[in-house]
């Protein structure tokens, strides 16, 4: 509750350029980006990129999610999924080069 004396000092402070907090400090609402990302906090995209060095199929999984617009759920995922797509492309080019070299 605001007391009358408090309101007068708040009005005087407002004239001096000071601002008062309208909402309660205890009433914090968690936003969309306050929640940690899945997969140990680094997100599905970066997890699939890093785990792809052990199992390259994870790069293709990240590429599938990237082209399936999975990042619309959380835009923080976009960079990791794009990195997985680039790694999948590089892996495909290297594998194709190896296969062509073996045939000729």
Image: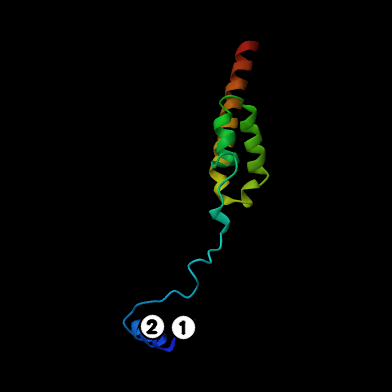
Q: Is residue 104 visible?
A: no
Task: Specify which label sits upstream in the sequence, 2 or 1.
Answer: 1
Q: Nearer the viewer, residue 61 or 37?
A: 37
- Taking the spot 60% from the left edge, 43% from the top edge, the residue there is 38
Counting from the top left corner in percent of width and height, residue 15 is at 34, 85
Looking at the rendered structure, the secondary structure element under dot 2 is: helix
- Taking the spot 63% from the left edge, 37% from the top edge, the residue there is 63
- Apparent side of residue 99 relative to residue 14 in the rendered image (left or right): right
- Taking the spot 50% from the left edge, 66% from the top edge, the residue there is 26
Asked if disc 2 and disc 1 are in contact, CB closer than 8 Å, the reply is yes
Q: Quadrant of the C terminus?
A: top right
Answer with the quarter of the image where residue 103 lies: top right
Answer with the quarter of the image where residue 14 lies: bottom left
Q: Is residue 48 visible?
A: yes
- The crowd level at tag 1 (other Cα within 10 Å; few <14, some 14-19, many 20+) is few
Looking at the rendered structure, the secondary structure element under dot 1 is: loop
Placement of 8 over or under 28, stated as above or below: below
Counting from the top left corner in percent of width and height, residue 98 is at 60, 16
Counting from the top left corner in percent of width and height, residue 86 is at 56, 35
Q: Nearer the viewer, residue 31 or 59?
A: 31
Answer with the quarter of the image where residue 92 lies: top right
> Residue tagged by mark 1?
2
Counting from the top left corner in percent of width and height, residue 4 is at 43, 89
- The crowd level at tag 2 (other Cα within 10 Å; few <14, some 14-19, many 20+) is some
The scheme the figure's colours follow is: rainbow
Disc number placed over residue 49 in the picture, else none = none
Q: Nearer the viewer, residue 55 or 9?
A: 9
Placement of 70 over or under 27, stated as above or below: above
> Residue tagged by mark 2?
10
- Taking the spot 68% from the left edge, 44% from the top edge, the residue there is 68
Q: Nearer the viewer, residue 104 or 95?
A: 95
Whole-Å distance between the Cαs marked 2 and 1? 10 Å
């Amino acid at each position: 509750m605001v007391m009358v004396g408090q309101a007068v000092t708040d009005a005087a402070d407002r004239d001096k350029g000071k601002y008062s907090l309208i909402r309660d400090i205890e009433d914090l609402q968690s936003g969309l980006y306050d929640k940690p990302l899945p997969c140990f906090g680094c997100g599905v995209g970066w997890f699939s990129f890093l785990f792809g060095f052990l199992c390259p199929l994870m790069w293709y999984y990240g590429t599938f999610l990237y082209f399936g617009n999975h990042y619309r759920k959380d835009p923080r995922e976009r960079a990791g999924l794009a990195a997985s797509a680039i790694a999948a492309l590089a892996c495909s080019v290297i594998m194709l080069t190896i296969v062509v070299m073996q045939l000729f």
